[in-house]
Image (spheres, rainbow, N blue to C red):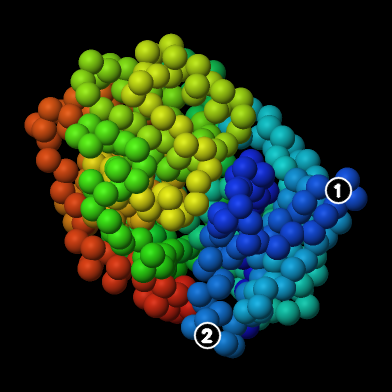
Amino acid sequence: MRVIFVIPFSPKYENLNAATSGSDYTDYPYTTNKSGEKVFFPKYDWGGLIGEHVLAADKTIHWEVWRPDDRADIVYQHVFDDGLIYRSYPVTARSYYQGMQRKRLPYSDLLEQELKTLCNQDPSTVVLLATTVEFCRLLHRAIRHATAKVLYYHFISEDYLIPKIGFTYNILKLIHRVALYFQEKRRLGLIGNIQVMHQIAAEKLNRLYPDKRVFFARIGIDLSFWENCMTKCEARKALGLPEHTFIFLMSQRLTQEYQLDKWLQALHKAKDQTFLCIITGTGIKTYVDCLARLVTKYDLNEKVRFTGFISDKLIRTYLSASDVFVSVPNNSGSTVSVVKAMAMGLPIIQTDNGATQQLLLENNAGILLNSRYDESWSNTISAVLAHELVIRTIPVDWLKREVSWDTCSRQWIDAINSI
């Protein structure tokens, strides 16, 4: 069986460019385009990670990852040692309407053409597309008359699969929302098979959409590395951190979707309390510069530290040294950094979206903040620092069992074989 996993966006080159010697990213192969730029084949994105473990569990499956790439001027391909094929396609622009707004979409006409040809030639092909992305809706329209099987993967909240019209007295906004609603309904009409990240979500969608097949399959993670190798005191000494100060740790791409600017605003309101917030990772330079300016504006220079891009080994030491792990995206799928923190036994503060939210709810653990910034963010910070709020942690043995690749790869294989 041939499986094509389509990733609807280009690699995060700001992370790849920031990679330092010895970090995860330097191990990924690359080629060079006509302009001399490196075109990476990063196996760390979801399609590569899932494919790697599915291939290890089932030798009858042939797994390929196709994606647009901002640096690809022709089609580039790399075959990994385990047989996983990675193809990068040139980007072409498409226009589309989102509600009443006309937008430009980084698309790939060549990817569409090749996928359409493949699906017509090989009806046993299984194509995996993202549910809520316009790129994948356009692709599905192109192959809808072929006999290939399509499974939509959905790594964010199931609420995004239930279109609603939010009322407003602003007539123009209301027209826009009504247009969005019907566009989403049409998008859902294309979908016959859906993968979701939580069993409760699968049951809910099966009730709402009896004409669709909904499968439960998580993204796994190898947590054997993510164990405490030193005490909190030892870790702080190794990193030169204060022994008794309360430490918040954040580790993700520094991009607007992760709302670090809002988190800094919440910290500002609690700045009279004693704490240190450490932020690892890198991102788009304009946003990183914006965060640096906000730290100064909010008088947090002594309370916030940026480490830049660091290795997993160093991240593990920071996790050992910290008191709470924080992740506040406005929309997230399965934030691996949060799961790593869970495996290290850290309490979690995160926004109420994504698969990690479901893990916390299932165990009555962590603190969930509103995805949109409000006063509760700073109130939660103050309550945690004052020890008025105790954050429950997830049992590590349960977590390792539920998110192990042995468990999760079998869920994906069962879903693919069932459609």
Dot 1: what SS? loop
Q: What residue sits 80% from the left and 69% below the top?
A: 117
Query: Does residue 219 appear anywhere in the picture?
Result: yes
Left or right: residue 394 compared with residue 105: left
Please, what is the three-letter code of the amino acid marked with disc 1? Gly
- In the image, residue 168 sits, relative to residue 56, either above or below, namely above
Quadrant in which the N terminus appears? bottom right
Quick check: 136 above or below 263?
Answer: below
- Disc 1 vs disc 2: which is toward the camera? 1
Which numbered marker is on residue 58? 2
Q: Is residue 96 left or right of residue 316?
A: right
User: Where, by quadrant of the figure, is residue 164 drawn?
Assistant: top left
Residue at image point 36% right, 68% down = 224
Between the C-alphas of marks 1 and 2, the distance is 38 Å
Q: Where does the image place residue 166, in percent across and percent down from the top left? A: 40, 29
In the rendered image, which residue does mark 1 sit on?
36
Q: Classify residue 354 as left or right of residue 273.
A: right
Neighbor class of circle 2 (other Cα within 10 Å; few <14, some 14-19, many 20+) is few
